Amino acid sequence: MKSIHADSSRFTVLIIDDERTLARSIKLFLVGQGYDAEVAEDGDRGLELLEKIHPDLVFLDYRLPRATGLELLKKIREYDPYISVVMMTAHGTIEGAVEAMKLGAFDYLKKPVDLDELKILVERAQENSRLRQEVRYYREKEARDPEASGLLGRGLGIQQILAQITHLASLQEETPTVLVTGETGTGKSMVARAIHSQSRRARFPFIEIDCTALPPTLIESELFGHEKGSFTDAKESKVGLIEAADGGTVFLDEVGDLELPLQGKLLRVIEQRMVRRVGSVRDRKVDAWIIAATNKDLEAAMADGVFRKDLFYRLAVFTIHLPPLREREDDIPLLAEAFLGRFAAKYGKRISGLGKPAIAALCEYPWPGNIRELKHVIERAVLAAPGTGGLLDQVPLGTVAQTRATPLRLRLDEPAGGGGPPGGKSLPEWERTLIEQALKETQGNQVKAARLLGITRDTLRYRMAKYHIST
């Protein structure tokens, strides 16, 4: 037999079985392998030991006096869903094993027990427990500390977004579909993860699907699954990503890139909470919270006929808009300091903070890549810094001309030939003039005005509210 890991003694196993000889034999075997193990002869004693020793793994007999193993399994899952439970039975059927797995059992073991098989199950459960503990740590860290997710800021805008996240996460019954909008790199996936990690669904899967990364020929199968033989390469049945997220959350990133036929199928999933695999005639019920995100103007896409109106209205039951980083100037130093602390610790650098030259450069930069770009800039700066103490004064930024700035930013620069807005106007005055001119040229049509300015409609609305512009 293979030698155990050095830390296996910390892994605790509880055996709940009324067959004393078998239970004690399993305990002696596990102790000999270096594990901690305890025995309970009935469910009541098992629950007492559960609270006393908090085991990592429970071997649970299917038939117990006064309570069934399935009833006890439910109580263990309620106490701590991260504890792995293996059902043991001499009377089990496939149906009983399937029922136990549905209730959250890690696996099942038939009697008489094969000790080699038992040892393999313990090793698998130990690895599974380690991974689950890591997941729980990061989920709890995100739930406690918005900074861990990059959702940090003093401005009213980010505070309102954090309040929206808290409100959504507190919902106990029905969870509405959520649409998160904003430019690339503004933190849309961070918002989705924060909602999930703080909600009652946090112990279930969070599955992120990048709608632009999946090939058109595979995306339907990936989303909805397929049956064996449904197409040439379908050599076995496959569960789709939406079905795999049952009980948890599906985050559809860049949902605006889905093709029209798939949009119709997604609409059906949202409305009926049913998934039909490719090649199947049977619907499968799925309880997954749908959160979608896009950097596109979906209202313009609807006008162009490339995005379904009914799907848009189903997705946009609750909308969160993330402003671009250039509109969060007060938050830039705060975010940069947070990233600086994180990367200085990661790379073992002694850096006390950002110097005034670095802060000034960061605040003047247009940030076309938003928070994602800021994060990478700070990481590169930390890597390049000597790390011997003191402030970080240099950050590796390109010039505005070298950067793919937004069309509106370019338009603001162009009239002045590089020397500022014309006619001695301030930048806000010139920006207001541009917006009013675009609205006038489009007869107040916000979608067309946003296109003319090269920004999203949400960004236009933000700026209109900022300058008190009405149509």
Image (tube, rainbow, N blue to C red):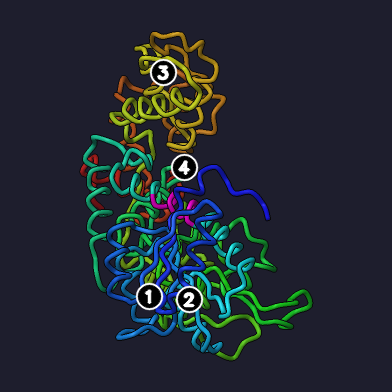
Report the residue marked by disc 4.
Answer: 185
Magenta part of the protein: which range? 129-136
Against 350, residue 340 (above or below) is below
Q: Give the distance between the C-alpha atoms of the residues marked 2 and 1, in whole angstroms.
A: 9 Å
- Residue 419: x %, y % from top left: 43, 17
Q: Nearer the viewer, residue 127 or 324?
A: 127
Q: Estimate how packed mark 1 is, as few (under 14), some (14 to 19) or many (20 or more) residues with alpha carbons within 10 Å.
A: many
Foreground label between 4 and 2: 2
Q: Between disc 2 and disc 1, whose residue precedes?
A: 1
- Residue 371: x %, y % from top left: 43, 36
Q: Give the distance between the C-alpha atoms of the residues marked 4 and 2, in whole angstroms.
A: 46 Å
Report the residue marked by disc 3.
Answer: 361
Residue 386 drawn in magenta = no
* Residue visible at 30% across and 60% down in the picture: 199
Q: Estimate how packed mark 3 is, as few (under 14), some (14 to 19) or many (20 or more) residues with alpha carbons within 10 Å.
A: some
Q: Nearer the viewer, residue 429 or 269?
A: 269
Report the residue marked by disc 1.
Answer: 73
SS class, disc 1: helix
